[in-house]
Image (cartoon, rainbow, N blue to C red):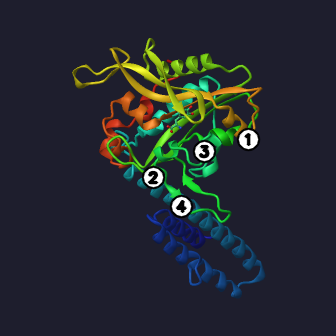
C-alpha cells in the first residue's frame, strides 16, 4: 500500500479512536465514509486509473474501508460501555439508607374472633356453612318453629323487606339460625357445622347495633344427646377464653327451635368495677343452646325418629368485647384507624387459639 494510503488509513483510524462521544464518532464516520467522505471521494477518483492499477487500488481502498468500519463499531461499543459505567457510578443505590416507615394494617377484632371460633370448632370437625343476609320468613322464623303469631317474633325487632312477587315475606335475617335449615336441606347427617355471619335487628345503643354478627352451630347424628352439647360448649368456652378451669353453667331457658333449651353462663368476677373472666362468684351469659326441636329437624328434611341434634348461637361482638376488654360496641363499625390501632391485631402477633 502506498504511503498516501497508509497515511489516510492512520489519520482516519486516529479520528475514530480519539472520538470521545457518539456525536464526534459519527462526525468521524461521515468524514471518512459519508457521501463526501475521503474514502468515498478516493473511490470515485479511480475511474482514471488503468485496469491493473484500479484493481490494486480498489483492494487497498476496500481494506481501509473495512478497517475504518470495524474501528467505528469497536469504538461505539467502548463508548456505550463507558456511558453505562458512568451511569452506574452516578446512580449507585445506597443500601445503608433506613427504610421509609410504612403504615401496616391491623386485623379487625371481629375478623380475628370469627377466625378463632372457626379454628376451635374446626379442630372439633365442624365445617363452615353460609346463608343469605336477606332471608325469607319461612327460613328465618317458620321452619325454626316460630308459628305465625308467636310472641318471640316481636322480640326480634325485625327489619322487613318488600314482599316478593310470589307473596313471600322477606326479612333481613334476625339471627344465623336459618342457616341451620338451609344446611340440613343440603346435607345428610351426620352434620357438624358452624355458620358465622351478619344479622340485623332494629336496635341501637352501647351494646346493640342494627347490624351485628352471630355464629350458629349445628350437630345432627343418630346418638347425639345433651352430654355432647355440654362437652362441646364447655370445651369451646375454655379454649376461647384461655382459662382451663373456667366454670361453665347451663341454665334452663326457652327458644322455639330447641327443646330443652339452655343458656350458657361462664364464671367471672365483677369486683372493683372491673370484669375478670374465670375467677369469682359472678356469672356472665355467653350463648344460647339446646336440643334441636323435632319440628325443626322435620323442616330440614330429617326424620326426628331417627336423628337428634343440638344447636347453639352466640353474638360475635359480645364474646369479642368480653375477651379483649372492649367497652363499647359502636366503634366496631366506625372504621376509625385509631381504634383499630388499639384493638386491632398485628398479623405477626396472632397466636393459634386451638393449639393452646
Ligand atoms: N338464634 C338465637 C338468637 O338469636 C340464638 C340461639 C339460641 C341459637 C339457641 C341457637 C340455639 O341455635 O340453640 O338469640
Residue sitting at 48 percent across and 47 percent down?
Answer: 154
Task: Please give the residue where the numbered disc 4 appears in the rendered image.
Answer: 75
Q: Earlier in the sequence, mark 4 or mark 3?
A: 4
Task: Please give the residue where the numbered disc 3 appears in the rendered image.
Answer: 147
Q: Earlier in the sequence, mark 1 or mark 3?
A: 3
Which residue in the rendered view is the most extreme toward the left? 272
**What is the C-alpha distance between the residues marked 1 and 3?**
24 Å
Task: Please give the residue where the numbered disc 1 appears in the rendered image.
Answer: 186
Residue sitting at 55 percent across and 44 percent down?
Answer: 150
* Quadrant of the image occupied by residue 41: bottom right
Side of 322 where 168 appears, left or right: right
Side of 212 where 307 appears, left or right: right
Residue sitting at 44 percent across and 34 percent down?
Answer: 347
Above or below, comparing residue 326 to residue 233 in the picture:
below
| Front residue of this view, candidates 150 and 172 | 150
**What is the C-alpha distance between the residues marked 4 and 3?**
95 Å
The picture places residue 173, in percent across and down from the top left corner, at 54, 48
**What is the C-alpha distance between the residues marked 1 and 2?**
69 Å
Task: Please give the residue where the numbered disc 2 appears in the rendered image.
Answer: 85
Q: Comparing marks 1 and 3, which lies closer to the viewer? A: 3
Q: Is mark 4 within 8 Å of ligand 1?
A: no
Residue 323 visible, this orientation: yes
Q: Earlier in the sequence, mark 2 or mark 3?
A: 2
Side of 70 where 349 appears, left or right: left
The picture places residue 80, in percent across and down from the top left corner, at 51, 59
**What is the C-alpha distance between the residues marked 1 and 4?**
78 Å
Label 4 environment density (alpha carbons within 10 Å; few <14, some 14–19, many ≥20): many
**What is the C-alpha distance between the residues marked 2 and 3?**
84 Å
Q: Is mark 1 within 8 Å of ligand 1?
A: no
Amino acid at each position: 500500500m502506498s504511503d498516501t494510503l497508509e497515511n489516510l488509513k492512520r489519520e482516519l483510524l486516529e479520528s475514530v479512536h480519539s472520538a470521545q462521544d457518539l456525536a464526534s464518532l459519527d462526525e468521524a464516520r461521515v468524514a471518512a465514509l459519508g457521501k463526501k467522505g475521503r474514502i468515498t471521494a478516493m473511490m470515485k477518483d479511480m475511474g482514471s486509473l488503468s485496469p491493473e492499477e484500479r484493481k490494486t487500488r480498489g483492494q487497498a481502498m476496500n481494506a481501509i474501508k473495512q478497517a475504518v468500519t470495524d474501528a467505528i463499531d469497536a469504538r461505539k461499543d467502548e463508548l456505550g460501555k463507558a456511558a453505562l459505567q458512568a451511569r452506574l457510578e452516578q446512580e449507585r443505590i445506597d443500601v445503608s439508607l433506613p427504610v421509609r416507615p410504612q403504615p401496616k394494617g391491623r386485623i379487625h377484632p371481629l375478623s380475628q374472633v370469627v377466625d378463632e371460633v372457626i379454628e376451635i370448632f374446626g379442630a372439633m370437625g365442624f365445617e363452615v356453612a353460609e346463608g343469605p343476609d336477606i332471608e325469607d320468613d319461612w327460613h328465618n322464623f317458620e321452619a325454626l318453629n316460630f308459628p305465625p303469631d308467636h310472641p318471640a317474633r316481636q322480640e326480634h325487632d325485625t327489619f322487613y323487606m318488600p314482599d316478593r312477587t310470589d307473596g313471600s315475606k322477606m326479612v333481613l335475617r334476625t339471627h344465623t339460625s336459618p342457616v341451620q335449615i338451609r344446611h340440613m336441606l343440603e346435607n345428610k347427617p351426620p352434620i357438624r357445622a358452624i355458620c358465622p355471619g351478619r344479622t340485623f335487628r332494629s336496635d341501637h345503643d352501647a351494646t346493640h347495633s342494627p347490624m351485628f354478627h352471630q355464629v350458629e352451630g349445628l350437630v345432627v347424628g343418630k346418638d347425639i344427646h345433651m352430654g355432647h352439647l355440654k362437652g362441646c360448649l364447655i370445651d369451646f368456652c375454655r379454649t376461647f377464653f384461655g382459662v382451663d378451669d373456667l366454670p361453665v353453667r347451663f341454665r334452663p331457658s326457652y327458644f322455639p327451635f330447641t327443646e330443652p333449651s339452655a343458656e350458657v353462663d361462664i364464671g367471672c368476677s365483677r369486683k372493683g368495677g372491673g370484669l375478670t373472666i374465670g375467677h369469682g362468684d359472678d356469672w356472665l351469659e355467653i350463648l344460647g343452646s339446646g336440643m334441636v326441636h323435632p319440628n325443626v329437624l322435620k323442616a330440614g328434611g330429617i326424620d326426628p325418629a331417627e336423628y337428634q341434634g343440638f344447636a347453639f348461637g352466640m353474638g360475635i361482638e359480645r364474646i369479642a368485647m368480653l375477651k379483649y376488654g372492649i367497652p363499647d360496641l359502636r366503634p366496631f363499625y366506625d372504621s376509625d384507624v385509631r381504634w383499630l390501632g388499639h384493638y386491632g391485631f398485628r398479623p405477626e402477633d396472632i397466636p393459634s387459639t386451638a393449639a393452646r
